Image (cartoon, rainbow, N blue to C red):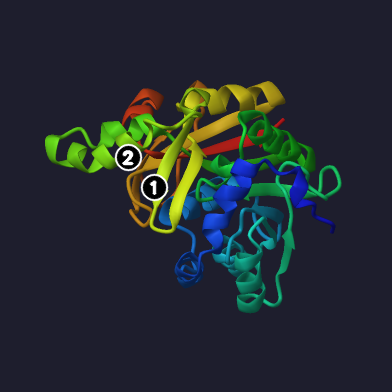
Amino acid sequence: MNFDSHTLHPKTLLNIKTYSDPVAVESYCKEKVLYPIEYDIVKNFFPPPPAHILDIGCGAGRTTGHLMSMGYKAVGIDLSEDLLVRARKQLPEAKFFKMDACQLSFDKASFEAAFFSFNGIDCIYPEASRFQAFRETYRVLKSKGVFCFSSHNVWGRFGRNFNPKAWKSLLPFILKQIKNKNFFEGYWVYPESNGSQLLYSKLPWINISFLESLGYKVQAVLGGKKRFDPEYKFWIPDKQEIKLDKSKGVKTSLLNIALTCHHIHYVALKL
């Protein structure tokens, strides 16, 4: 499958570059399993194995490997060649491709589910290209296919730290935005140990609105504080009778999630 990096925006390429840092690569290679909130989403909303799953932004194979161990037929794609090299080494039996989520090289209705984890979709700049990734995912999903992705919600970052001590730690983050020319587009500068990233970070209603405009039905919105924390919050729209089996999720309002959760997971069904 051919890949042309010239089609990517320079700011997207800068975001991807941070994932090629040797320290970052080694860090991602150490993680082998789905986070608790991700595992609960797969168990409660994804079709049963051996469904075909497109793992977008697969990195070094953390999610792909775990999905395969659960019996799924997963295909991983990413834009970081350094991470893909390690993914292929760690999971030689898996299929990995270097591919742009905005231009998927798969036929229409190829997958029963798509998974874009770890806020990877927020690396795409500008917003129009990010929404194109939504469209492409919709195209390659079968009818009743499930799309799950996670995204930053900067207002939840402020809300979860609503105390004087925690706000002190937010000061460097706030100062980073002074020279951020993309602030009013909803992109915030996130300082990392290996450089800064420009990441999309808007309130959940924006993501929900666009999903629905494409023809998705949002099934759940979930938010947690830490990656490996088994406790999280979830919201089920339209009074749907969905019960999360064997989870430690606490049902709440979408407003509560928006004000207290920095990382939000969305689960949507293609109608």
User: Foreground residue, 117 or 5?
Assistant: 5
Q: Which residue is mark 1?
A: 191
Q: Is residue 207 above or below residue 199?
A: above
Quarter where residue 216 is shown? top right
Residue extending furthest front? Answer: 179
Question: Does 178 sit left or right of 206 as displayed?
Answer: left
Instruction: Give me the residue at 34% from left, 53% from top.
Output: 230
Instruction: Pick the quarter of the image with the N terminus.
Output: bottom right
Residue 23 rendering spot, x and y as whole percentages: 45, 69
Instruction: Give me the residue at 59% from left, 42% from top.
Output: 11
Q: Which residue is mark 2?
A: 173
User: Foreground residue, 12 or 83?
Assistant: 12
For the residue carrying disc 2, how many other residues have a C-alpha within 10 Å: few (<14), some (14-19), or many (20+)? some
Q: Are marks 2 and 1 in contact (CB under 8 Å)?
A: yes
Question: Does 245 sit left or right of 141 as displayed?
Answer: left
Residues at marks 2 and 1, CA–CA distance in whole angstroms? 7 Å
User: Foreground residue, 38 or 57?
Assistant: 57
Question: Does 235 sit left or right of 131 as displayed?
Answer: left
Secondary element at tag 2: helix
Q: Amino acid at mark 2?
A: Phe
Quarter where residue 217 is shown? top right
